[in-house]
Amino acid sequence: MKTYLFPALKLTLLSIVFFSVIYPAVVWGIAQLSPTKGNVAWFEHKGKVVGAKLIGQSFTQDQYFQSRPSAAGYNAASSVGSNKGPTNADYLKEVQARIDTFLVHNPGIPKNQIPADLVTASGSGLDPDLSVQGALVQIPRIARIRHISEEQLQQLVKNHTQRSFIGGVETVNVLALNASL
């Protein structure tokens, strides 16, 4: 019995120390190297907090840029992808419904010019960013509703275009873009 009990106790104590003290300390230390020091990066507009910079939000009014669809219903407590593959019939119906809705709100945009990120949810379901093309394709609708020139909106999108620090593709934070409107 001693042959098995003492090694098991040692492994248990080692695991407790590692996973309760050492590992969290290392993760906390790495988080301190980030710009927000591991805290939520709040987005403020005119002195008021209007949302978190890294969590997608729903914008349903036509006068705003629409966000990427969310499989989590934009609920940060339940970050989740859809887990449906590209051949799943339910998934294809969802995407087609999103395409149809987009075309109703954006007349004159050909179906083949709708960027995929406007009709498919991200892996987390909470992506705050949109491709530059996803923002640009919405400009005619917003210009028409807000009575702003398309050139002004294109410049606004350009001003909010960012590239991730590891290279990556250019994206636009939808919350920041809409706050600028």
Image (cartoon, rainbow, N blue to C red):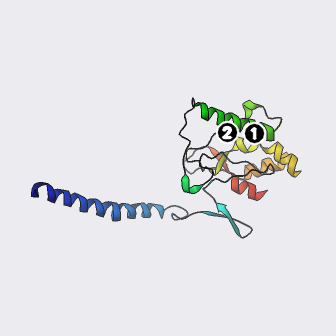
Question: Which part of the image, by quadrant, shows the N terminus?
Answer: bottom left
The outermost residue toward the right is: 147
Query: Mark 2 or mark 1, which is nearer the start of the sequence?
Result: 1
Q: Are marks 1 and 2 in contact (CB under 8 Å)?
A: yes
Whole-number angstrom distance, CA of label 1 to CA of label 2: 8 Å
Between residues 161 and 143, which one lies in front from this camera angle?
A: 143
Return the x and y of residue 103 as percentages of the image width and height. Answer: 78, 36
Question: Which part of the image, by quadrant, shows the C terminus?
Answer: bottom right
Q: Amino acid at mark 1?
A: Phe
Return the x and y of residue 11 as percentages of the image width and height. Answer: 22, 57
- Please, is residue 19 above or below residue 164 in the view? below
Q: Residues within 10 Å of mark 2 (few under 14, many from 20)?
A: many
Mark 2 element type = loop
Between residues 115 and 152, which one lies in front from this camera angle?
A: 115
- Please, is residue 23 above or below residue 67 in the view? below
Return the x and y of residue 82 as percentages of the image width and height. Answer: 56, 42
Tell me if residue 149 can be seen: no
Q: Amino acid at mark 2?
A: Val
Return the x and y of residue 152 as percentages of the image width and height. Answer: 83, 50
Instruction: Residue at 34% x, 63% y: name it.
Output: 20
Instruction: Residue at 80% x, 41% y: name it.
Output: 105
Instruction: Residue at 16% x, 57% y: name it.
Output: 7
The outermost residue toward the left is: 2
Between residues 27 and 108, which one lies in front from this camera angle?
A: 108
Residue 102 circle label = 1
- Please, is residue 163 above or below residue 108 in the view? below
Q: Mark 2 — residue? A: 119
Tell me if residue 155 can be seen: yes
Mark 1 element type = helix
